[in-house]
Amino acid sequence: MKTLPVHLDLFALIILLGVAQGLFLGIFFLTGSRARNLTNRCIGWFMLGLSAIIAEIFLCYTNYMFQVLWLVDFSEPINFTLGPVFYFFVFARLHKRLPAHWRWHLVPALIWLINSFTWIYQSAEFKYNSYISAYHPELSYVPKVNYIEEDFTGLRGIVSELTMLSCLIYAVLAFIAVRKAFRQQNSSFWGNAKPGLRQVRNLVLLNLAFPIFGSAVKTQFYEDLGDYILACYITLIIYTMSFLVMRGSDFFAEEPAPEPETDLPSPRKKYEKSSLSEEVEEAVLQKLTRLMEDEKPYLESDLSLPKLAQRLKTTPHHLSQLLNDRLEQSFFDLLATYRIREAQQLLQDPATFNLKIDEIAERVGYNSTSAFHTAFKRLTNQTPAQFRATATSSRSA
């Protein structure tokens, strides 16, 4: 079997950086307390899937695949998972749950996974021929040796086209879901909306362009020779997600200057030199109430004091001052009050009676079920299960 020397250039470097960053993001979202959030799990698996695909492209493009023939087509079994998982991410981001009958969306992926065993467990000669047919058609095939019958679906010859079609269908479904969310907020799709919704919109548009761009690339190149261009586009998606994660992180928010300690800890004394007038305080308080009642930002598990202050067009320090001074609450007390009120409505609503307690917790913005139980017990003197049982008894009486 003839081999070729390793080929490295700028495209190879870009793709390799995408692989590394995708792996980092996938592990980041799927570990720690972040993994308790459904949206994080969806985007985490999506990032790992993208990394696997462009990792294979990197090996093929640089000719490293000659050194590891056993990895030929190792990422192909996940071709039909990328579209559904991205759609799940968008749907979960908007609705805090997966779409109805979500398992059916993964049936094509399961069939293709089973089918993949018919070419994964083949001889090195078979994998060599598969690789050079896609990337080095100028090389000669080696004689066939004990091939196992492959591809019981008969679709492998058009798998690239089917993959692009799958990605397009689910990108359109994600686009429709986001457009519907904008309409429900009476916002223009291209106009202003909640920052989280705008971020999802931008990711959907970037993802929607992928199958269109990919189809254009595929028509210009023989077999998989243009895949390095697609891998660079996928790298762009990965780094866009990284940028959104960093932009939304509290780690980069400016910390307010610490207040001098005093012997009188009362809220009014703490802020007696405040730059907020009574009129400004009242205006911000009314705006806060309207925001919490109309847009329900407290349902977002990543809502923070800086993010809430940004929506109110004030500073985190002034918002903290307002909560302590006028409402005698901390930011976390405010969140808990609204979240537990929302949870009470879900627990006593017959339409959501089938939801488990941990699903209720996730819907109202808690990443941790134990934190939800603690807050619920503190504010209602009942556990969520006790509250649901009492509500059910009252309704049936």
Image (cartoon, rainbow, N blue to C red):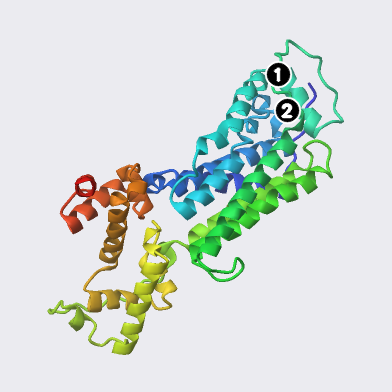
- Locate residue 301 relative to residue 389 in the image: left or right: right
Rendered image quadrant of residue 345: bottom left
Q: Specify the label residue 300 is tagged with.
A: none
Image quadrant in which you'd find residue 323: bottom left
The picture places residue 270, in percent across and down from the top left corner, at 21, 80
Which tag, 2 or 1, sits closer to the chain's start? 1
Q: Pick the quarter of the image with the N terminus.
A: top right
Which residue is found at the position 77% from the left and 45% from the top? 215
Residue 43 image position (x, y, % from top left): 51, 47
Q: Amino acid at mark 2?
A: Arg
Task: For residue 208, say whether it is visible.
Answer: yes
Which residue appears at 43% of the width and 51% of the height?
A: 96
Q: Which mark is residue 156?
A: 2
Kindly identify which residue carries mark 1: 150
**CA–CA distance between discs 2 and 1?**
9 Å
Mark 2 and 1 residues: CB-CB less than 8 Å, in contact? yes
Q: Nearer the viewer, residue 165 or 229?
A: 165
Mark 1 crowd level (few <14, some 14–19, many ≥20, 10 Å Cα)? some
Secondary structure type for disc 1: loop
Q: Residue furthest top?
A: 146
**Residue 86 x, y percent position in the rendering:** 56, 46
Looking at this view, name the residue that lies furthest to the front. Answer: 397
- Report whether residue 9 is seen: no
| Residue situated furthest left in the rendering | 263
Total label count? 2
Drawn side of residue 88 relative to residue 144, left or right? left
Residue 191 lies, with reference to residue 114, above or below; the image says: below
